[in-house]
Amino acid sequence: MDEDCANPLLAKWLKERMDTAREHNSKGYQTYKKAYQSMKASPITFSHPSEAVVLNGIGEKLCAWLTEQLQNHCRENGLPMPQKKSSGKRPAEDSERSERQGSPPKRAKKAQPYVPKFRSGPFALLLALGTLNREQGQAVSKTDLIALAQPNCDSSFTAPSDPTKFFTAWNSMKTLENKELVCTKGHPTKRYYLSDEGWEVALRLKQHSQAISLPPTGRGKKVATTVAADPTRAITTTEVEVFDLCSSPERRPPRQRPLKRTGVPKSPVTLGQTGLQSTSETIILPPDSFDVRLVLDNREVRTSTDRDYVSQELKKLGVSPITRALPLGDMVWIAQVKAEFAGALQRLNIDDEEQEDGSSAEVVLEHIVERKRRDDFISSIKDGRFHEQKFRLKKSGIKHAVYLIEDYSISADHAERYGEAMETAIKQLQVVYDVFVHLSPKLDDTVRYLARMTHHLQAHYRHRPLHVIRSNRVETQHYMQVLSKLRQNEQQQQHASSLSSSAAVFGITFSAFSAMCDKHDSLTLRDVYLRMLLCIRGLTPERAVEISKIWKTPIDLVEAYERQPAADPKARDNMISDRLGGAIPRKKISKALSAKIAERDSTILE
């Protein structure tokens, strides 16, 4: 029994029910667990179980069950059953006084008007039906109504937000019909229109939503009556979570701002009629020479039968994505160089082979997204893909990497078993690898996040020059050193300069990015060595790196084992733990793990 709890009996019964649900692998386990934790944490002592309804996770049904348990307990132990407190009763003397004075008749409680959630299914349907001609009694079919309503709704009317479920935003039409806000006519094809009460609600919603989403204007421009007709306007109405794009606030420069810095040498050489400037390491594209585009990996699909869902939904939000196979990540933003500048870029970047798909005239920007559904995230942790993807993101040199984890229905047992591993992995991404983690409730929210990011980046790069690193400087072994040097020089020049300006942006062509990130062509001996070590269960990337610092290659490790005395079998087992046993906890190698590595090495020797 939880003696330190304010209500030990109630907590005990909830714990028993929680344990029973866990033994039977019941879906109610999470419900009882939440109720038990709320009861255990509550500092309030309840005189009757019905009072526990104020706690998070405890409803009327659980209170009724707890009351029944308490009645049985009192009956078995000969104890009086506590009386349920009656709310709103006055003391006897107050009652007599009120009777003498004559209490005024109670006013009937006015029913609250129906107000749907902003950008929900009912909200969008009412707004759409509110655009019809009321005087002529106009009505629309389901197909036409969905087309009118979809721009004002965050959920899809045609596809469920979760592939495992069957509910769409259209299911909210039943709620509107039950509340007699929407009427139907026609057979067999139903046509929908608003009732008188529905028109009142729709007009209120239209006025309220226009006040929220339409910007103040004093120029006399006409504004569309349909709310959120502009996809970018629909995006800005919700609070968003966008990671920091630069260290200092963006200042809009004059329209024709001269280029002041190149990141390395201070005197760029202008070549060609396009006015492109270049140095020994970079080619500088002026702000008006490229367009920012979103590239989707062609394997990012909603289901096997609905492969174009993401790109189609993005188009509705004003973003036209490019779909192709990506060597790294699931979404990346590129600068698509305009035709009048593409030829000059390719001539200056002589070591970059001209590609048929035009990827040599596309520059990868400093933003990339790795998307995982929750079930796939757990699988990647189990099979080790998570560690590989984490390293490849870091190795790419892309400054702003986002790990987007999308919620997905999994069993309570699965969530309980791997919940701690997920939390550890997320914290590791944020703290150790400096990767931004974005949690998305569903696919539709992911689409809106990508649309917001695209519009944000288009505005961010509109007045910034882009420094393209020459392809002959992009080699797997030395690229990070080159990039680090450029960024370091840029920071030094920025500190030395008295003028406040934004940091330079560095990128490489998409073709060079693909070649560098290729899983097989870009592997060095050290990469293969680390992969071999990571095949051993329990050996984390940090520990593998520490081993590779002491024994540089696989043959170094094998020879070190061969030098151990044959008469002492423990010498081989403890060789690594003796060297790394005193490291910090996440890099420390225990004797058991050291013995496991030695055992794996002995199989290689055989």
Image (cartoon, grey):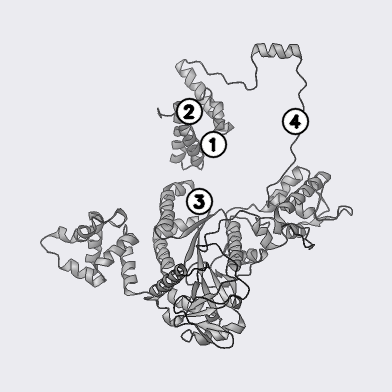
For the N terminus, give its image quadrant.
top left
Sequence-wise, the earlier of marks 2 and 3 is 2
Distance Cα–Cα, label 1 vs label 2: 15 Å
Q: Residue at x 41, y 71 (%)?
A: 484
Task: Name which of mark 1 and mark 2 comes first in the sequence.
Answer: 2
Q: Is residue 439 left or right of residue 587?
A: right
Q: CA distance from mark 4 to mark 2?
A: 36 Å
Query: Which comes before the other along the chain, label 4 or label 2?
Result: 2
Q: In the rendered image, which quarter is residue 539 located in? A: bottom left
- Element at badge 3? loop
Question: Which residue is pictured at 62% across the width and 21% down the height?
Answer: 86
| Mark 3 lies on residue | 410
Provide the secondary structure element on which disc 4 rests. Answer: loop
Amino acid type shown at disc 2: Leu
Residue at which label 2 appears: 10
The answer to which quarter of the image holds residue 493 is bottom left
Residue type at mark 4 is Lys
| Label 4 vs 1, first from the N-terminus | 1
Q: Secondary structure at mark 1?
A: loop
Vertical relation: 379 (above or below) 2: below
Structural crowding at the residue carrying mark 2, measured as other residues with C-alpha within 10 Å and reported as few (<14), some (14–19) or many (≥20)? many
User: What kind of residue is marked 1?
Assistant: Asn
Q: Position of residue 123 (x, y in %)?
A: 72, 50
Where does residue 327 sit, x and y in percent of width and height?
A: 47, 72
Q: Earlier in the sequence, mark 3 or mark 4?
A: 4
Mark 3 residue crowding within 10 angstroms, few (<14) / some (14–19) / many (20+): few
Q: Are dots 4 and 2 in contact, CB under 8 Å?
A: no
Label 4, label 1: how far apart the Cα atoms are: 28 Å
Q: Which residue is mark 1?
A: 56
Q: Are marks 3 and 1 in contact (CB under 8 Å)?
A: no
